[in-house]
Structures are given as C-alpha cells and as structure tokens.
Amino acid sequence: MKEQSATYRITDLEEAERPRERLAKHGAQALNNAELLAILLRVGVSGENAVQVGQRLLQELGGLQGIHRASYEEVCTQRGVGLAKAAQIKAAIELGRRLAVETQQEQPSIHSPVDAASLVLYEMSALEQEELRIILLDTRNRVDKILTIYKGSLNSSMVRVGELFKMAIRSNAAAIVVVHNHPSGDPEPSPDDIALTRAVVQAGKLLDVEVLDHLVIGRGRYVSLKERGLGFG
C-alpha cells in the first residue's frame, strides 16, 4: 500500500513561527523574504512547508530580483507554485513597482546618487535589455520627469548626445541625471560608459544644463560615475 504524500501547511508550523501570526504581531518588516512569499503561497508541497518553498524559489530564481525578472510562465513552472500562486506573486511585485512610481510622482528632490538611484533601481534592475533614461530636474533639484531615451544595445557611438538634451531644453530643466542599466547585473562602468559620460558632461556645459551624475544600474545595485570621478574631470 502506497504511503500518501503530505502537503505541508503554514498551520503545521509552531504558532510562534507562522509568518501570518508574526506579521500581525510584529509587522511585515519583521519577516524575511521566504516568509513573505510563504504568506502568498499559503501551502507547501510534499516534504516542504510554505516557508521552505519560498526559500527554494529565492534560491532557484536568484532572489527577489530574480523573481521580479522572471516571466509569469517561468514562475508557474516552479514546483509548488502553479498558475494561481504565480499570479499572486507577480501581482505583489507589480504593486511594489507601482508604489515606487507613485513615490516618484510626489516630486522628490535629488541631492545624492542614492536619491537618484532610489527612483529607478527597483524597475531598472529587472530590465532584460539596456535602457538609457534621463531624470529632469528644476533649479531646486526637484524631479520634473523621468524619460526613456534609448532601448537596446548601447554604446557611446550609438547614443546621440543631442537627444539627451532635447527634452531637457524643451522642459526648461536646470539639470539632468543620466541613468542606464546593464542587464548582466554587473554595474561596473565600461569604457563606452565613461566616454558617453564625458561627452554628455561637455555638452551640458555648452547648453547650460548641469549633468549631476551618470548612474549605471545592475542587479539591485548601482555605480555613480560622479562618485568615481569617471568622465567628470
């Protein structure tokens, strides 16, 4: 007679270890990533409770950034997930992205590379192709707009510097921050990135639009070329 495989539920955990109860008592910030995923998953599979399934998803897909980057279909194929749970996970991530966008729309100010990176890091970390964006700022360094200028493979010879300043001049921007991503996940600036920075900074001086920084976004991290002194000499 075959032994029936058990499905592990959150209620199989000790009450003090149950993510839902811990969230209610201590707040969502007290839970780790696997526990937050477990709340969305609700139940585990044979041999794994929901927290363990969450831990496995993080390991196999490359952490929260990996789940963010993965397609809906990829998440569906993970053992213990399926269509409904994958939809819940992707919906939760999208809510986080929209919250970040709403925060941007409150016209924040940029006074450091961290301020600029916080506006784009979440979304641009998950992009599968390169994008170059500019953040337009007023005279008080308040954000006016964030515009996507280029998509696809980028190098300094392909980017027309005039395109970066066209919308800045039309919007009467006092300054800009240039941002682009490396889909490889490594934000280390390339020689092309440095050459582009140098060209943009020089053009900004001629057009009286200050270039505050050029950020390269990787997977959950970034590099400020201004802080490195690259292209801003």
Image: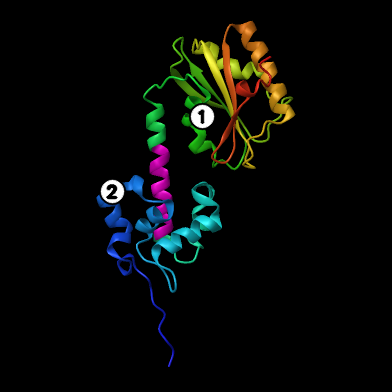
Q: Quadrant of residue 205?
A: top right
The residue type indicated by label 1 comes to Ala
Q: Which residue is mark 2?
A: 26
Residue 98, above or below 49: above
Label 1 vs 2, first from the N-terminus = 2
Q: Quadrant of the N terminus?
A: bottom left
The three-letter code of the residue at mark 2 reads His
**Which residue is drawn at the image coordinates 64% and 39% (left, top)?**
186
Q: Which residues are magenta?
A: 85-98
Whether the magenta-drawn stretch holds residue 208 is answered as no
In the displayed structure, 152 sits above or below 66; it is: above
Q: Nearer the viewer, residue 201 or 207?
A: 201
Dot 2 crowding, Cα within 10 Å, few <14, some 14–19, many 20+: few
Magenta part, dominant SS: helix
Callout 1 secondary element? helix
Q: Which mark is residue 95?
A: none
Side (left or right) of 192 relative to 11: right
Percent position (x, y) of residue 182?
Answer: 63, 37
Spot occupied by residue 180 in the image (x, y as percentages of width and height): 60, 30
Residue for badge 1: 117
Label 1 environment density (alpha carbons within 10 Å; few <14, some 14–19, many ≥20): many
Numbered disc 2: secondary structure: helix
Front position among marks 1 and 2: 2
Instruction: Answer with left or right where residue 203 lies relative to residue 82.
Output: right
- Residue at the image point whose x is 54% and y is 36% from the top: 124
Quarter-of-image position of residue 126: top right
